[in-house]
């Protein structure tokens, strides 16, 4: 199979994972409920993605930097919404 | 800064993101509730990680293959638990 095919697979993979928290953000806004979400998962993911971003800057890989910066923004948004809609 | 430092950053980043759904799996088992989770997020993430795995096999990168295979297993577990504990 050709290079174009594999490049497309890579781009699809990166796009799907980078924006995967967007439907969760939409759901939390619609339902105004966040109690079933694991805060540890969100914080662990945020820290991991932050380190990926730092690593990407070190190896000067624009794809790793961009994908992880966008993901970090969506996770920080989600963590903020978690606290906004967290019921006592 | 030395290579060892950056290798450690990369390993920490990969470990944190690979196992990020584990606390969510533990929480869903403890609370027996999954209604606030976005199924679209889980399915989108699973498809993205699956494509990353395929891409890793293509470029013969053992790190990409391993990390994404482990993540895929945790997401499939989470999707199964989502349906087990989904209330009507």
Image (cartoon, coloured by chain):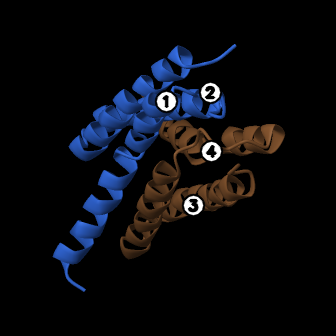
Chain colours: A blue, B brown
Callout 3: residue from which chain? B
Mark 1 vs mark 4: tell me if same chain.
Answer: no
Quickly name the residue at label 4: B21
Rate crowding at label 1 as few (under 14), some (14 to 19) or many (20 or more) other CA atoms within 10 Å: many
Label located before the other in sequence (2 or 1): 2
Q: Residue at x 37, y 75 (%)?
A: B58
> Could you say which quadrant of the image residue A59 lies in?
top left
Quickly name the residue at label 3: B72
Relative to A15, residue A9 above or below: below
Q: Tell us which disc is closer to us: 3 or 2.
A: 2
Q: Which residue is drawn at 61% across and 34% down?
A: A41
Q: Distance between the residues labelled 3 and 2?
A: 20 Å
Relative to A45, residue A39 above or below: above
Quickly name the residue at label 1: A46
The kind of secondary structure element at disc 3 is helix
Q: Distance between the residues labelled 1 and 4?
A: 12 Å
Callout 1: residue from which chain? A
Mark 2 vs mark 4: tell me if same chain.
Answer: no
Is residue B6 at least partly visible in the picture?
no
Q: Distance between the residues labelled 1 and 3?
A: 18 Å
């Amino acid at each position: 199979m050709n290079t174009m095919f594999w490049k497309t697979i890579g781009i699809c993979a990166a796009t799907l994972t980078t924006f995967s928290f967007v439907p969760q953000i939409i759901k939390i806004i619609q339902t105004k409920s966040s109690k079933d979400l694991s805060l540890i998962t969100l914080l662990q993911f945020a820290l991991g993605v932050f380190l990926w971003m730092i690593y990407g800057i070190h190896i000067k890989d624009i794809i790793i930097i961009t994908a992880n910066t966008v993901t970090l923004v969506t996770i920080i948004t989600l963590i903020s919404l978690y606290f906004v809609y967290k019921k006592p």
